[in-house]
Amino acid sequence: MSSCRHDHEEAGGGGGGGDGHDHSHGHSHDHSHDPEDPDGMSLFGLIDTTRVRCLNESAPGSGLNCLKPWDKRRDPQPRLESEEDDPELIIYVPFTQVVKIRAISVTGGGEGSAPSAMKVFVNRDDIDFGLAQDLPAVQTLEMVRDSGGVEVDYPTKLSKMQNVSDITLFVPSNFGADSTVITYLGFKGESTKFRHGVVECVYEAKPNAEDHKAPSGETGGRNIL
C-alpha cells in the first residue's frame, strides 16, 4: 500500500454507527433534485460541494468528479481514481440540509477497478484511514464487480439514515486492479427541510431536567426560570 495519502479540501470529514452488511442491490433507472431526475429522489442538489473531501485521490480535487447530476450519471469522465498501487479511498460528502438516504448509487470502473466493498459512516467529520478500519460502520455494502457502466443502487438501512448531515464512505478494496475507479456516486432520498445548524440550535435550546437538579442535600423550594 502506498505510504502517500492525499487530503485535498474540496471540503470537510465524517461517519459512525452499528456495523451491518448489505448484499442487496439493483440497477438504477431513475431519480433527483437535479433537473433530469424523473422521480425527484436524487440528493445531488443538496450536496455541499464546497466542503467535499477525498483522501488518497490520484489528483487534487478529483473527489468531486464522481458526484454528478442525474443526467450525467453514465458519463465515464470525469472520474475519481485512487493513487496507483493503493485501492483505498475515503469520500466525505456533507449536505446543506439534513436528509434521509434511501439508497447509495455507485458506478465503478472496469477491469477490476470497481470498489468491492464500501463502509458507510454518518454524521462524523473525523474519519481517517485508521478510524475507518477500526470503527463499526452504520452499514457495509458488498458491491458489484462490473455493472457495465450502469449505476447500481444499494439500499440503505433506513433506520440508520434518518437524520444525515454528512456521510463518509470508505472503500477498502477493489476487484484486483492497481487503483480504484468510481465514475458515479449518488444518493437517493429526501430532505427533512432542516438545516444542520438550525437543528443543533433547537436541541441546544431545549431544557434538560438533569441540568436543573438541586445540589445534594437540597430539595424543592427553588424556582429555576
Image (cartoon, rainbow, N blue to C red):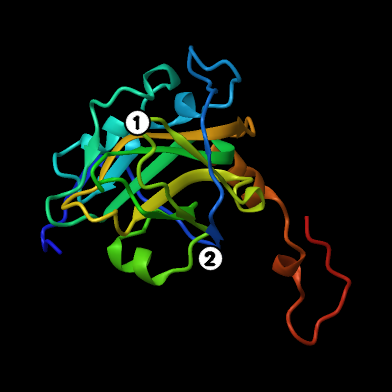
Q: Residue furthest top?
A: 35
Give me the residue at 59% from left, 34% from top. 189
Secondary-structure class at tag 1: loop
Give me the residue at 35% from left, 68% from top. 133
In the picture provided, is 60 more to the left or to the right than 176?
left
Mark 2 is surrounded, within 10 Å at the Cα level, by few (under 14), some (14 to 19) or many (20 or more) other residues, namely some
Q: Nearer the viewer, mark 2 or mark 1?
A: 1
The residue labelled by disc 2 is: 19
- Find residue 201 and report its horizontal and vertical position in percent: 60, 44
Count the labels in the image. 2
Quarter occupied by the C terminus: bottom right
The residue labelled by disc 1 is: 149
Marks 2/1: CA distance?
29 Å
Residue 183 vs residue 207, the one in the foreground: 183
Vertical position of residue 215 compared to residue 89: above or below: below
Vertical position of residue 170 compared to residue 153: above or below: below
